[in-house]
Amino acid sequence: MAVEDFGGEVDGIPIEVIHGDHRNRADTGASRARNGTTAKGWDMINDLSNPGSPWPCAVADEQQRHAIVNSSSNIGLTNDACSPT
């Protein structure tokens, strides 16, 4: 795993991989994303492939966190919520 390759940290900042199951439900994905970025201090949400899960995670990205959507078919991410960068 890449985290182990870097020794668990980059420039002295620890890296931790946390797994969460959204159960193919957008509301669960949104809740976990918001809780993770606000209460738990997550910096990034990654590997979002279910059509329902990336949308709420992109909304959680408004909290200046990173969300990486790998392969979603949710058209809203490429239209209404497309970021300028």
Image (cartoon, helix red, strand yellow):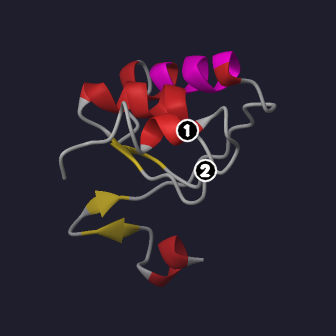
Residue that numbered label 1 is attached to: 54
Within the image, what quadrant is residue 78 found in? top left
Q: Secondary structure at mark 1?
A: helix
Camera-nearest residue between 24 and 2: 24
Q: Kindly identify the residue that appears in the image at 32 percent across and 41 percent down.
A: 82
Q: Kindly identify the residue that appears in the image at 49 percent across and 71 percent down.
A: 3
**Residue extending furthest right?**
23
Mark 2 touching mark 1, by CB under 8 A? yes
Q: Kindly identify the residue that appears in the image at 42 percent across and 58 percent down.
A: 15
Pick whichever of labels 2 and 1 is earlier in the sequence. Answer: 1
Alpha carbon separation for disc pair 2 and 1 = 7 Å
Q: Is residue 30 in the magenta section?
A: yes
Q: Looking at the picture, does residue 74 appear above or below residue 85?
A: above
Q: Secondary structure at mark 2?
A: loop
Mark 1 surroundings: few (<14), some (14-19) or many (≥20) residues within 10 A: many
Camera-nearest residue between 7 and 30: 30
From the top left corner, tell me how far across and down residue 46 is, in percent.
51, 52
Q: Amino acid at mark 1?
A: Pro
Camera-nearest residue between 7 and 56: 56
Within the image, what quadrant is residue 24 found in? top right
Q: Tell me: 55 left or right of 7.
A: right
Q: Looking at the picture, does residue 51 appear above or below residue 5?
A: above
Q: Kindly identify the residue that appears in the image at 30 percent across and 38 percent down.
A: 65
Q: Amino acid at mark 2?
A: Ser
Residue that numbered label 2 is attached to: 72
Which range is magenta?
27-34
Q: Quadrant of the N terminus?
A: bottom right
Decide whether the magenta segment is chiefly helix, strand or loop: helix
Q: Is residue 31 in the magenta section?
A: yes
